[in-house]
Image: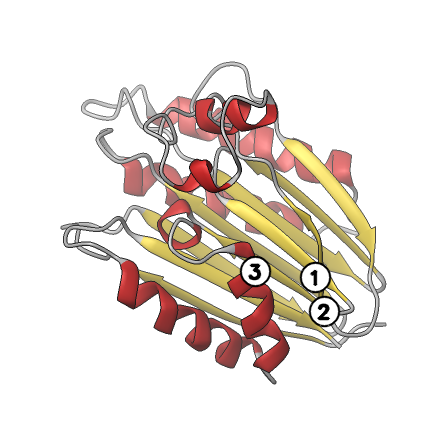
Amino acid sequence: MSILSFYSYTNQGGRENNEDSIRAWSQDERGVFVLADGLGGHNCGERASETAVETILNGCVPASGFSCSFLEEQMKEANRLVLEGQKEPGCGDMKTTAVALAIEGSEAFWAHVGDSRLYHFSGGELTHFSRDHSVTYMKYLGGEISYMDVYHDDDRSSLLRVLGKADCHPETGSSVLRPGDAFLLCSDGFWEFVYNEEIQADLLKAETPKQWVQLMLLRHIRRTPPGNDNFSVIAVFAD
């Protein structure tokens, strides 16, 4: 059985609106954490992200158990509702990324669509982070660019999978929890300015999820340019 603690933070950055949405819920050894990033430049991006996080959270909280296939179905339901929302005037292009983490007892399950990320740390080491569904990340996987180029490549905002397209293909994963495991969910406006090694280094210094986030935000604020994107993060400790 794991005792869960978490801290969530969102900021509109240098934009007029915050199109990121976050939701977090925990009770006893169960927890559900969801983050979505409405696509900038599209109508109703904020509404798309809110639809995604509300749908996934509301589907997970009353569930009798979690699995990768269950989370995949919640993502597909969120996609259906975002597609429904596109029928309303002015919202025909609304889309969003999404990443979700569901924990119960000694098991964790996650799913994502787009370039909002999930990081999993165990024993203080980064054991997994999600693959961006973007043109840039495909270039990295194909050996055209280095991993550090992912942070600056011109195609990083060209997403191959999002909620709001007829074909929704979430990517899922799972892990057995160990004492001291930690998870980070974040939008691209956050991870583009805080590198993997720094996320790990700040985790090793932190005693709480809030402290972990605060340490990373100190790095983030020094690097963000004027007019920077919205940025959001959810940190979770399983003790």
Residue 47: horizontal and vertical position, in percent?
Answer: 31, 40
Decide: few, some or many residues near mark 1? Use Cα within 10 Å; few <14, some 14-19, many ≥20. Answer: many
Q: Which residue position holds label 1?
A: 121
Residue 208: quadrant of the picture: bottom right
**Residue drawn at (58%, 23%) of the image:** 143
Q: Nearer the viewer, residue 209 or 216?
A: 216
Q: What is the x, y in percent for residue 26?
A: 63, 68
Label 3 amino acid? Glu
Q: Which mark identifies residue 11?
A: none
Find out whether the residues at labels 2 and 1 contact each other: C-beta distance under 8 Å.
yes
Q: Mark 2: which secondary structure?
A: loop
Does 187 appear above or below 75? below
User: Hey, what amino acid is under mark 1?
Assistant: Phe
Relative image position of residue 21 (x, y in whole percent):
39, 51
The residue drawn where x is 39% and y is 31% is 156
Residue type, mark 2 in image: Gly
- Circle 3 residue: 197
Q: Is residue 93 left or right of residue 213?
A: left
Q: CA distance from mark 2 to mark 1?
A: 6 Å
Q: Is residue 214 left or right of residue 14?
A: right
The residue wearing badge 2 is: 124
Tell me the crowding category of disc 3: few under 14, some 14 to 19, or many 20 or more residues within 10 angstroms, Cα based: few
Q: Is residue 115 above or below residue 83?
A: below
Q: Nearer the viewer, mark 1 or mark 3?
A: 3
Number of numbered tags placed on the structure image: 3
Q: CA distance from mark 3 to mark 2?
A: 11 Å
Q: Is residue 171 above or below residue 227?
A: above
Q: Nearer the viewer, mark 3 or mark 2?
A: 3
